Image (cartoon, grey):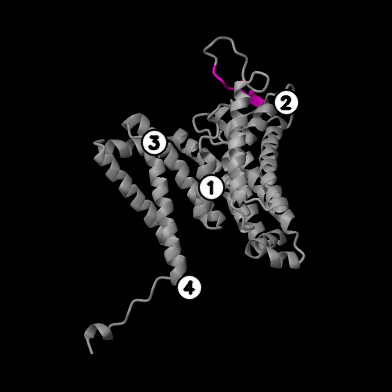
Amino acid sequence: MSVASLSPSRPPLPASILRLLFPLGAVLAAFAVGMAVVVIMGVPLDKALFAFWRGAFGNAYAISASLNRAVALALVGVGFVIANRAGLTNVGGEGQIAVGGIASTALCLTPGMASLPLGLAFIIPMIGGALAGGMWGALAGLLRARAGANEVITTLLLSFIAIWLLYWSVQSESLLRQPMTNSATLPESLLIPDPTKAPLLTGSYASPVTIGLPILAVVAVIAALALRRSLFGFQLSAVGLNPVAAARAGIAVGSTMVVALFIAGALGGLAGALMLQGEQYSLKAGFSSGYGFDGLVVGLLARGSIVGVIAGALLFGFMRSGGISMEMAASVPSALVGILQGLIVLMIAGAAYYVDREAR
């Protein structure tokens, strides 16, 4: 008998610890690949890293901008998790952000809106943006419930329609385009009035964290409690696991699907309203900026965890800010951040498969 056979074997790490270690390892590995790409491009690594750090964490403004980006991503991600609990895959965050921004802009520019008291001037456009996104999501839910249409296809195609509606809105003076004074007038809406802008938590544009951060905290807590401890969360899980058995148990499967996609769309629309009222202040053609698809990735990576959504949104939000700074200060294409995000997704997906297989 060999000595090796007598030595005790090390017990495998618990699956819960592996689920924590693998994402951290994936992020570190992706950043290592990114640094290697920067070196291959001939850009001094210290210059690129300093630019990334300065853009993401360099000062109060950079941190605030990163947090505002993370809020939008997290809202879309929370909506994805809620819909996914019912067995639905909402890939329409981009369109839901777009219609939320359109509705929010239209309400902000409505005559008399800016003069409303008690904060209604910014609250009503936010609610309007959320409702617009919710109805856009519910439309896909109705198509799924009534016609059996795959929600992946319908939410994606509805996003294309919403983006073209956005283009139409900012190109047409009869809709939201600012009046043209000369040929150089940009195709965008007028600036929204100051009373309709989302309040800043600090009250200073030197660190412009908006009211979206506490809104996200409330949404995240409610979503986590609802998914774990409420009858609605149980119904979502039942429909997602086995819609036939759920229907036999008396659960309205179609209505549950519509409500789930309405909530997901409403959170996307709220993200669009916060982006418009908290950062951009005017509606532009590139308004949604890919936040819907990044939020989808955040929701996928979270694997049903609201805490995971927040962590992923913070990571991607700060990466976005750092990538923009790298492109401006170190001439490193911001597309590198997209590559790193893709690597993180692939690594975590592979790790999740390994962990689940070992658990089984």
Q: Kindly indicate the quadrant of the structure image that contains residue 336.
A: top left
Q: Earlier in the sequence, mark 3 or mark 2?
A: 2
Please give the residue where the numbered disc 2 appears in the rendered image.
113
Please give the residue where the numbered disc 4 appears in the rendered image.
360
* Real-space CA distance between mark 2 and mark 4, rounded to the nearest whole angstrom: 57 Å
Residue sitting at 40 percent across and 70 percent down? 13
Residue sitting at 32 percent across and 31 percent down? 331
Is 339 within the magenta? no
Query: In front here: 251 or 19?
Result: 251
Disc 1 + disc 3, Cβ < 8 Å = no
- In the displayed structure, does residue 68 sit left or right of residue 322? right
Amino acid carrying label 4: it is: Arg
Kindly state the secondary structure of the residue where label 2 is placed. Answer: helix
Q: Is residue 325 visible?
A: yes
Residue 173, placed above or below residue 333? above
Please give the residue where the numbered disc 3 appears in the rendered image.
334
Please give the residue where the numbered disc 1 appears in the rendered image.
296
- In the displayed structure, does residue 298 sit left or right of residue 338? right
